[in-house]
Image (spheres, rainbow, N blue to C red):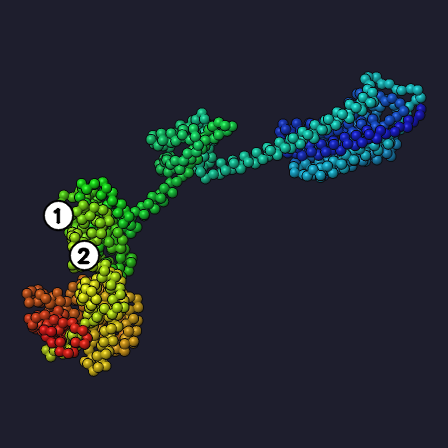
């Protein structure tokens, strides 16, 4: 028996190595597929991967065997070949199953490697046994081949574990496949080197069963293995692409599902058959029901949330949206707890593959938004303080009534202004001023018929009424009279009673104006005429009032420049003490010599100065000029008597009044005891604040006089604590002394009270000797008036023109 010497076919060796590398690459790819697969897909890839990997290893082995060329014709035993083919498939299944587990320990890796190595070794030597000849082996080389098989198997499993995650780069996989393929091929060729082939001369052994020719077997195995591995790699590649696409689809689906499920807006998905296919949790929050109350139910289940008309409109809108494009609208539903919910709805058709398959109804709770919008709209057309319609709403109402009447219905526009409100606001502060205005609005609302008159607050202390459906002008005048009367009733503020009055101007449509602007302007003109006439009343508009309004506008413009132009003058009216006719003082009285209109009486321009705020600047100028003049008289050696200056309400409530007066005294050099400030009772509305102001003024050393005493309402109870030096009896009492015994009683009481409180008392407006005798008979000794002297310019005060009758 001889040992046959064989040679290797280099081409088949290369092919076997290529098969080994490709089989390894396919196994590495399949490890990732199997690791990510689940269910039936996992079983498919596990079985297919075991077949591909096992057949790849077996094919590499047999191609390698066929590469050995012996000097005889080789035949193989088919059953053993099949057995050697099954072994690697079985152990490949175990190997792939091992590496595809979620948690792969080193112990599991070692056991799997040993099983894979045993399968490869058994496959190799079973395949060698299928050859029709006797083979002996070198035990050391066999041991080496087994060792290489074990190391190659463990390395293969380790590489599969590391490369089973998706996203590994191709170069890494190729390098790993080369290492793994070289290890498998190395094991095979070491095993082949361990074999010695023995043959008898002239005898070729034959086995029972089918045998196959060597060349045919090589061709079949090479082509089929390459084809199978190629299909496996291609299938893995296609599957990877599909997995990536599926993963992207799943990821996008999760994104959109998250948007659907977590959307704060409610979403109801309805298919074309009218069945609710899906809803999101926001719908459950909105309706208070459960998911099963909607999903799979016909869309009619939504009817319970709507009233019949609202549901009909929603169905119409839903139908319109399903036929065209997205449609937005608003509706409302009733929550099971009885609460009404305002909804903003968008119906969006679902268009798939060119056809509409359903509709998404997206709903948002806009209840709070609608409430906020309603509040904003209300505030835009209503006064926040009184909740009455404001100027914008009043203008719109008047315009609407005019357009509706078309000249056939008579309307009346009343503009009402509260007299002396500014004194309340300045004295008590804005908080009490707001309370007062609320009470005014309430009182007016009590005397008007809402079906015939609409009350509005125009701003500040100005109100307006639109009257309609009245029988005559007398009815409108009667309503105005009732408003004036009810507003005269005292108001209790800060524990004190305050009295105010109202001035109302009335314009009639269409005779006093055919447009809204004309009516309101003319009613304003009539109201200002009431104020100029003494306030506390009402008046219908007349054409003559336009001239008065024009006068006011022109005077206001000129008054702003009067100081700069030197048009203001101060006249002085002396004050005397009887019976010796002793000069005890003089009152500074403002005059305006207009370059065009001549001398304008104070009663004509002082109210305008107070309305425009110019009274502060003018009052400061008067105070300075009077102090300068008094100091000049003193320097000339004239009698040193005080000069009296009237303070306006706005001046009195200046925060820095005492500092202003102190500065003027310092600049003019006038001794404070020769300055007397006259204030009115109306300034005493807030007694505590007024006392504080008067004490600060008294601290400067100046004299304080209470002017027009007896005409006010609120200062009498505080008179004993006011730092007042002198009371001035108002001319309205003096004028009627000779005709009215009641006036004499009032004056007598005032005089007695003043003396009992340690105050001086002076009467103003003395025009007759009879008035003088009555007052001196009641122990009033200080006077001023036309009986003694008219107010005169300073240069005439001491030239004899101050004598009686001048």
Residue at 81 percent of width and 33 percent of height: 187
Residue at 19 percent of width and 81 percent of height: 638
Residue 276 spot, x, y in % from top left: 45, 29
Residue at 14 percent of width and 70 percent of height: 764
The answer to which image quadrant residue 536 occupies is: bottom left
Specify whether 756 is left or right of 367.
Answer: left
Q: Secondary structure at mark 1?
A: helix
Q: Residue furthest front?
A: 596
For label 2, the residue is 547
Residue at 21 percent of width and 53 percent of height: 524
Q: Which mark is residue 474?
A: 1
Specify whether 202 is left or right of 171.
Answer: right
Specify whether 267 is left or right of 432.
Answer: right
The answer to which image quadrant residue 82 occupies is: top right
Tell me if residue 314 can be seen: yes
Residue 166 spot, x, y in % from top left: 65, 37
Quarter of the image with the C terminus is bottom left
Tell me if residue 284 can be seen: no
Residue placed most toward the observer, 435 or 309: 309
Residue placed most toward the observer, 198 or 739: 739
């Amino acid at each position: 028996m001889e040992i046959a010497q064989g040679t290797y076919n280099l081409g088949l060796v290369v092919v076997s190595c290529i098969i080994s590398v490709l089989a390894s690459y396919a196994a590495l790819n399949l490890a990732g597929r199997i690791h990510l697969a689940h269910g039936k897909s996992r079983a498919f890839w596990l079985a297919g991967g075991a077949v591909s990997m096992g057949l790849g290893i077996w094919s590499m082995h047999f191609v390698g065997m066929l590469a050995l060329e012996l000097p005889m014709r080789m035949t193989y035993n088919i059953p053993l070949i099949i057995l050697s083919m099954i072994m690697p498939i079985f152990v490949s299944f175990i190997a792939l199953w091992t590496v595809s587990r979620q948690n792969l320990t080193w112990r599991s890796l070692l056991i799997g490697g040993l099983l894979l190595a045993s399968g490869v070794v058994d496959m190799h030597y079973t395949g060698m046994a299928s050859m029709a000849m006797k083979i002996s082996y070198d035990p050391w080389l066999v041991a080496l081949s087994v060792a290489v098989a074990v190391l190659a198997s463990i390395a293969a499993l380790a590489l599969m574990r590391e490369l089973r995650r998706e996203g590994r780069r191709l170069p890494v996989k190729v390098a790993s496949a080369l290492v793994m393929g070289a290890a498998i091929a190395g094991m095979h060729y070491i095993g082949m080197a361990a074999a010695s082939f023995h043959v008898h001369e002239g005898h070729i052994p034959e086995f029972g069963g089918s045998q196959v020719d060597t060349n045919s077997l090589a061709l079949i195995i090479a082509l089929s293995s390459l084809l199978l591995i190629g299909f496996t790699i291609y299938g893995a590649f296609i599957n990877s692409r599909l997995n990536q696409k599926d993963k992207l689809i799943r990821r996008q689906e999760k994104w959109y599902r998250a948007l659907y499920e977590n959307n704060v807006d409610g979403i109801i998905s309805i298919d074309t058959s009218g069945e609710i296919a899906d809803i999101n949790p926001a719908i459950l929050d909105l309706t208070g029901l459960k998911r099963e109350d909607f999903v799979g139910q016909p869309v009619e289940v939504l009817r319970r949330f709507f009233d019949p008309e609202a549901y009909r409109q929603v169905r119409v809108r839903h139908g319109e949206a399903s036929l065209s494009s997205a449609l937005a609208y608003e509706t409302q539903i009733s929550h099971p707890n009885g609460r009404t919910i305002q909804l903003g709805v968008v119906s969006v058709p679902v268009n798939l593959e060119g056809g509409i398959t359903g509709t998404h109804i997206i709903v948002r709770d806009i209840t709070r938004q609608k409430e906020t919008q309603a509040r904003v709209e209300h505030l835009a057309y209503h006064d926040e303080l009184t909740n009455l319609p404001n100027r914008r709403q009043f203008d719109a109402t008047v315009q609407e009534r005019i357009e509706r009447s078309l000249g056939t219905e008579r309307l009346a526009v009343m503009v009402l202004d509260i007299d002396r409100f500014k004194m309340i606001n300045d004295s008590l502060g804005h908080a009490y001023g707001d309370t007062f205005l609320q009470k005014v609005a309430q009182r007016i609302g009590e005397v008007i018929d809402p079906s015939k008159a609409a009350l509005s607050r125009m701003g500040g202390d100005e109100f307006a009424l639109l009257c309609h459906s009245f029988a005559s002008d007398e009815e409108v005048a009667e309503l105005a009279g009732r408003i004036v009367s009810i507003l005269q009733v005292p108001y209790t503020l800060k524990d004190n009673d305050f009295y105010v009055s109202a001035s109302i101007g009335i314009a009639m449509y269409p005779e006093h104006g055919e447009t809204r602007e004309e009516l309101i302007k003319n009613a304003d003109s009539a109201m200002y005429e009431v104020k100029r006439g003494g306030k506390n009343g009402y008046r219908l508009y007349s054409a003559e009032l336009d001239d008065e309004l024009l006068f006011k506008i022109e005077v206001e413009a000129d008054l702003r420049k009067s100081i700069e132009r030197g048009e203001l003058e101060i006249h002085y009216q002396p004050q005397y003490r009887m019976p010796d006719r002793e000069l005890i003082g003089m009152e500074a009285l403002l005059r305006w010599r207009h370059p065009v209109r001549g001398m304008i009486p104070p009663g004509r321009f002082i109210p305008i100065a107070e309305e425009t705020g110019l009274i502060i600047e003018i009052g400061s100028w008067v105070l300075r000029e009077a102090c300068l003049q008094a100091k000049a008289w003193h320097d000339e050696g004239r009698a040193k008597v005080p000069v009296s200056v009237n303070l306006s309400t706005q001046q009195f409530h200046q925060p820095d009044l005492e500092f202003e007066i102190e500065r003027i005294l310092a600049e003019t050099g006038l001794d404070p005891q020769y300055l007397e400030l006259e204030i009115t009772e109306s300034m005493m509305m807030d007694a505590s604040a007024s006392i504080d102001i008067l004490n600060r003024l008294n601290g400067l050393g100046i004299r304080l006089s209470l002017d027009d005493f007896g005409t006010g309402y609120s200062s009498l109870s505080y008179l004993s604590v006011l730092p007042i030096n002198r009371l001035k009896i108002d001319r309205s009492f003096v004028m009627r002394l000779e005709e009215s015994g009641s006036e004499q009683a009032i004056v007598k009481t005032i005089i007695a009270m003043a003396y009992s409180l340690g105050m001086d008392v002076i009467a103003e407006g003395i025009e007759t000797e009879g008035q003088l005798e009555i007052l001196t008979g009641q122990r009033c000794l200080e006077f001023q008036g036309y009986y003694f002297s008219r107010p005169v310019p300073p240069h005439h005060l001491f030239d004899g023109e101050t004598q009686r009758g001048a």
